[in-house]
Amino acid sequence: MPEQTPRPSSASVNPADVDRFNRLGDLWWDATGKMGILHEINPIRVDYVRDLAVRYLHRDRFSAQPLEGLGLADIGCGGGILAESLAELGADVTGVDPAPNNIEVAKRHAKKSGLEIDYRNVTAEALAESGATFDIVTALEVIEHVEGQKAFVATLSRLVKPGGLLFLATIDRTLKSYALAIVGAEYVLRWVPRGTHDHDKFVRPDELAGWLRHAGMREIDRAGMTFQPLTRSWRKSRDTDVNYLMAAKKDG
């Protein structure tokens, strides 16, 4: 039998989580399937990145491609859902993921979409060791799946150019998040596969802000993402008790 190519590994990589997401294949792009929730919240995530980039990186808010000319790294890019949306806004996107199947799916879909995205089957640590830096770094719905979360945030900071922005999204560690993000989303509504989340790896917003400060970043914004049962839709809100976004700037 031919030898399998070794998967990239690092201190932050959780092999079990990598294997779980690696098995998804083309399900990443099934908007009604197991990853459908990412498609539903993606417009909120994209608008959040765009609006804060316009404000803090002094971009043209009226441009159809306000991120044009900016280098952007999407860490834990999965099948490329966020990466493609940001590339459509003009960003020069590098997408990285330790799961090889994710990268292959992302490459195929980008080609089908007519987008040029630099996808790499590497870890965030390897990208940082290469000396690469970016105007914007995103790691959305990623930190709750890694080991050594504080050190991982420091690695992300290394990837941000002075004056650049870092965007994170994760889940607050509350009883409410256990009820909604695990019991509700995984077992009752089955929005995501069972075992996707570990409540102990959820991160309090102030905890995350502290890790950012320790890594030389300054929090500039936080916002919640909440589900509206009556309309079956998601919206940005002030409620960060479950899903939330956070943005930070590297001054310099």
Image: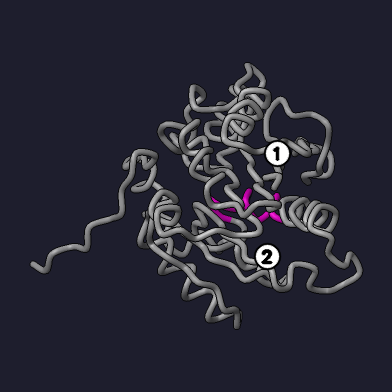
For label 2, the residue is 86
Q: Which mark is residue 29?
A: none
Outermost residue to the top: 175
Left or right, 18 with respect to 133, comes to: left
- Dot 1 falls on a residue whose secondary structure is strand
Residue 148 to residue 247: above or below: above
Which quarter of the rendering shows the N terminus?
A: bottom left
Q: Is residue 39 magenta?
A: yes
Number of other residues with Cα within 10 Å of mark 1, as a class: few under 14, some 14 to 19, many 20 or more? many
Picture colour scheme: one colour
Q: Amino acid at mark 1?
A: Met
Residue 164: percent from left, percent from top: 68, 53
Q: Quadrant of residue 178?
A: top right
Q: Which residues are magenta?
A: 33-42
Of residues 99 and 184, the one nearer the viewer is 99
Residue positioned most to the left = 1
Which of the pair 84/122 is nearer the observer? 122
- Which residue is pictured at 49% across the width and 27% down the height? 201
- For the point 69% across and 50% down, the residue is 165
> Does 125 appear in magenta?
no
Q: Residue under circle 1?
A: 246
Circles 1, 2 touching at the beta carbon (< 8 Å): no
| Residue 116 image point, x, y percent | 57, 78
Q: Is residue 66 above or below residue 142?
A: below
The first of marks 1 and 2 along the sequence is: 2
Q: Position of residue 169 (x, y in %)?
A: 64, 41
Question: Type of residue at label 2?
Answer: Leu
User: Is disc 2 placed on a helix, strand or loop?
Assistant: helix
Outermost residue to the right? 62
Q: CA distance from mark 1 to mark 2?
A: 17 Å
How packed mark 2 is, by other alpha carbons closer than 10 Å (few <14, some 14-19, many 20 or more), is many
Q: Count all numbered tags in the image, as a single digit.
A: 2
